[in-house]
Image (cartoon, grey):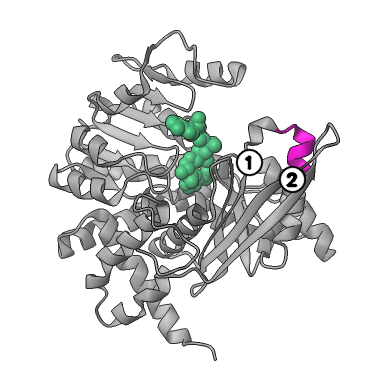
Amino acid sequence: MSALSYVSQDKDSAWATWLSQVDRVVPYLGDLAPWADTLRHTKRALIVDIPLEMDDGTIRHFEGYRVQHNLSRGPGKGGVRFHPDVTLEEVMALSAWMTVKSAVLNLPFGGAKGGIRVNPRELSAKELERLTRRYTSEIGNIIGPQQDIPAPDVGTNAQIMAWMMDTYSMNVGATTTGVVTGKPIHLGGSLGRVKATGRGVYITGIAAAQRIGLEIHDCSVAVQGFGNVGSVSAALFYEAGARIVAIQDHSATLWCESGIDIPALTEWQRENGTIAGFRQAETLRSDDFWLKAYDILIPAALEGQINAERARNLNCRLVLEGANGPTLPAADDLLRQRNITVVPDVICNAGGVTVSYFEWVQDFSSFYWSESEINQRLDRIMNDALRDVWLQAEKLNVTLRTAAYAIACERILIARKERGLYP
Ligand code: NAD
């Protein structure tokens, strides 16, 4: 359990999951093991109050966070989540996973994450803009293109990034496009960014499927979450000829043995704002999502979704972690025992941070690349990283997650050690 006074002792919390993942990699860190404790601490955690005047004239207060877990390898990088259940502890874990993710992909970033405890669906566009601008001002002292670069996550999008960029630019007196990534294209955003995370899930998923002998066009796929990551992943597997048999979001669980028509579902969601009510599929009880048989499961919603009980019952061959932290440690052990391969979040969903890196580089040079250049570079980086993680897992006889952590933590802790402690 955590030695930090401000975190709970909840063994299923996202931070507890992170600590357990660190414990699992320590035996493989050799001479660097004495430095591992640095990973159990966040470098900086800022809590801010965001007072907001609502459209009806009342004032409400929202709690916001920005956490920088580790900056040894470069500026902080990580999304901003707007969700009513966000907590400091969750943001800490998400920031730590960003540290590992950047290092597995060998991107020159540390790990950070932010969030506001708010349901953005309950705010008007004007309220959302005021909330975003005040939050950006409150965390303005610790973000910047060389310090910490936010991006979209659950409940945030390109428009929110545009408001963040504008607010930061107003405060520093100069247009600073490189302060956030995931911006609209005409504000220095990168082509390919919106689809990058889902594309990364697909690229690593295809590579992993081949390695365990699955043919994509014979595969059935279940996807939890039909937002940015889930919908793009589902569309790419659909286009590759897989049958998408189940889709679950916060509103409904859909099932169709012969395969859901993903373009039709996307259109339905665009028109109705939800997947619920889609008539070309059966609607299941939400728990049945975990009991059905399919080849590939893509959790692409929130963390902690695959617990021990679900892991015991899952009837699939491959789990592609589109979400951050969807598998609890006890479930990880069961999946390994049951010979279900898990491509861990820190590599599987790293397509977004990789194209964020491309966006940051393009903003610095004000020289923009074509979408095909971006996708080619993304595919190469992700395939190379998956290959290295796979070889490491075979060499150490560990899960892909522990192998990815072994590669990443070595890079992080070498940087930590070589920089030395200040003062
Ligand atoms: P999003 O807000 O676009 O979509 C989230 C989806 O999850 C929605 O379809 C929502 O209905 C569904 N959902 C929410 N609660 C649910 C529940 N209890 N049961 C089932 N479904 C539920 O968010 P996103 O950007 O797609 O992010 C999804 C996950 O991927 C998160 O874990 C996020 O941290 C991770 N991720 C996102 C990116 C990115 O670039 N957007 C990058 C890396 C990782």
The majority secondary structure of the magenta stretch comes to helix
Left or right, 357 with reference to 37: right
Which residue is situated farthest in the top direction here?
279
Residue 130 located within the stretch drawn in magenta:
yes
Callout 1: 10 Å neighbours few (<14), some, many (20+)? many
Amino acid beneath label 1: Val
The N terminus lies in which quarter of the figure? bottom left
SS type, badge 1: loop
When the figure is inspected, residue 205 is found, relative to residue 1, above or below; the finding is: above
Indicate which disc, 2 or 1, sits on the residue closer to the N terminus.
1
Q: Is residue 264 left or right of residue 84?
A: left
Q: Which residue is mark 2?
A: 131
Report the amino acid beneath label 2. Answer: Leu
- Residue 85 picture location, percent across and down: 53, 42
Mark 1 Cβ inside 8 Å of ligand 1: no
Helix, strand or loop under label 2: helix
Q: Is residue 27 above or below residue 377?
A: below
Magenta part of the chain: 123-131
Residue 369 visible in the shown view: no
